[in-house]
């Protein structure tokens, strides 16, 4: 099942409750939730069918995420500090691009790599509603 932007925003709201119930020995900066879903990474690489200015949507498997970042299984390695775009779709079918920066990449053999990434920004093709903006800001800023 694909992760939609609307589901992503709803899950972010749940983080406030989870942060209150975190274990004392959890040293992470933000609570992480395991959530398996298909996401799409935009790639300009010709090997993925993309080209400059015309990226291909390459599927990846989301493993977990937090308000600060995510971990996903991808088909090829990425280098620390590489940037990439995850494209989510909102309830109206419009694309919302999440700009991410690679924090680590672990090779699981062959064409399977676990990539941890930090969210840098949302490059919305459509401005989120005022209600969505407030919910996102409240979740991230506390």
Image (cartoon, rainbow, N blue to C red):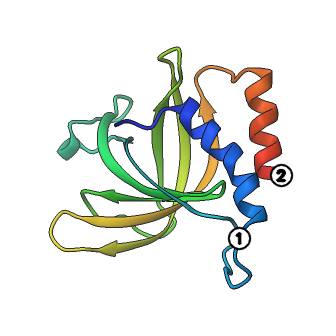
Q: Nearer the viewer, residue 85 or 39?
A: 39
Residue 11 disc label? none
Which residue shows up at 68% across the image and 48% down it?
A: 14
- Give the image location of residue 27, x and y in percent: 68, 81
Above or below residue 108? Residue 52 is above
Above or below residue 101? Residue 6 is above
- Give the image location of residue 28, x and y in percent: 66, 75
Above or below residue 3? Residue 73 is below
Q: Is 41 left, or right, of 47 in this rendering?
A: right
- Reading the image, the residue beneath label 2 is 141
SS assignment at label 1? loop
Which residue shows up at 29% across the image and 41% down it?
A: 58
- Give the image location of residue 100, x and y in percent: 54, 52
Image quadrant of residue 98?
A: top right
| Real-space Cα separation, disc 1 to disc 2, in angstroms | 17 Å
Pick out the residue farthest to the left: 110
SS assignment at label 2? helix
């Amino acid at each position: 099942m694909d992760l939609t932007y609307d589901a992503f925003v709803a899950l972010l709201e749940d983080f406030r409750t989870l942060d209150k119930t975190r274990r004392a020995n959890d040293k992470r900066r933000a609570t992480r939730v395991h959530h398996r879903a298909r996401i799409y990474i935009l790639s300009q690489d010709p090997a993925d069918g993309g080209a400059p200015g015309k990226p291909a949507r390459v599927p990846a498997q989301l493993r977990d995420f937090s308000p600060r970042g995510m971990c996903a299984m991808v088909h090829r390695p990425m280098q620390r500090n590489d940037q990439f775009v995850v494209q989510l779709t909102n309830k109206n079918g419009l694309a919302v691009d999440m700009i991410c920066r690679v924090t680590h990449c672990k090779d699981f053999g062959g064409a399977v790599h676990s990539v941890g990434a930090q969210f840098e920004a949302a490059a919305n093709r459509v401005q989120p509603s005022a209600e969505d903006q407030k919910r996102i800001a409240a979740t991230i800023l506390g």
